Amino acid sequence: MVIATVMLTPQGFSYAINGIVRYVGLALVLLPIFAWPTFLIQAAFPPPGQGRGRALIGLWFGGAVLVSAMMNLLASMLSYSPNPLHFDPAGHRLIPYDPRGGFLLGSFGICMLLSTGVWGAISRVLPIGFVLKGAIITGLLLFGAVAGLGYALWQQQSSSGFGQSGFQRVPEQASAIPRPAHVEDVDGYWEPEDGYEWVVSDWRELRVEWKPGLPSSRYPHVVASAEEGKWRPADGYTWLDPERPNDYRVRQVAR
């Protein structure tokens, strides 16, 4: 879960660990209140070879760490953005920033945790081998369902998030790569130059291309021509002064 959280967190390893530490204090207070039946069962039936006090302390601190890691992972999943702010390359030297991989790894961990928790509740009345097989199979089936749903949603988001001309803005500080050609800095954001649109606007890669027919954001009723860097009047318009190459004023064609 920690690795998946770091893969989802733009700020990197130290930020994720600090989040887990903050959640541990909260979990230590709330766990005995909301999970008192589990503490009661642990006190009544401690694991073989452990006293009641040791079993309760292990459950308390181990459960707090596990719950805090889970909360931090879920918070990272819910706060994910395709254009993250405050990206820290130094925080991903050991564990790369890979949100898709983080989602898969985190979902796998959560599914296996739920499965082992459910099967573990009945492990004392069933053979241990049967419980282990059931937990593994159930976790894999649950992960397959979650991964399939996540893949469908991710593909839908990806297909609708790009190719929408230059209106998508990428925070300049979100990317650790140099600014590519035909991308300009506008108030701390990277935007395609007039006539270009995003092909890839991920934090690891920025690439634009000339889009024929794209309306100009600076010149009214002027669109990008088939030749890169050239402009033409929009349909129903003509140049006001064709003899001046840098005069992009147009007039409506008389009908």
Image (cartoon, helix red, strand yellow):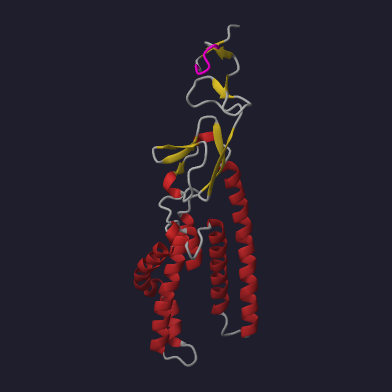
Q: Is 117 or 183 nearer to us in this picture?
A: 183
Question: In front: 247, or 78?
Answer: 247
With 216 as the anchor, is 23 left or right in this view?
Answer: left
Which x, y percent locates residue 63? 43, 75
Report whether residue 1 is seen: no
Q: Is residue 18 above or below residue 241?
A: below
Nearer the observer, 40 or 251: 251
Residue 54 in the image: state x and y as whole percent. 40, 87
Q: Residue at x 45, y 82 (%)?
A: 41
Identify the residue shown where x is 57% and y is 70%.
Answer: 112
Q: What is the span of residues highlighted in magenta in the rendered image?
A: 242-247
18 up-or-down from 243: above or below: below
Q: Which of the image's four quarters has the C terminus?
A: top right
Q: Position of residue 237 (x, y in %)?
A: 57, 14
Give how far across and how far down residue 6 sits, in percent. 47, 63
Queried whether the magenta region covers residue 138, the answer comes back as no
Q: Residue furthest top?
A: 255
Q: Nearer the viewer, residue 197 or 16?
A: 197
Quarter of the rendering containing residue 224: top right
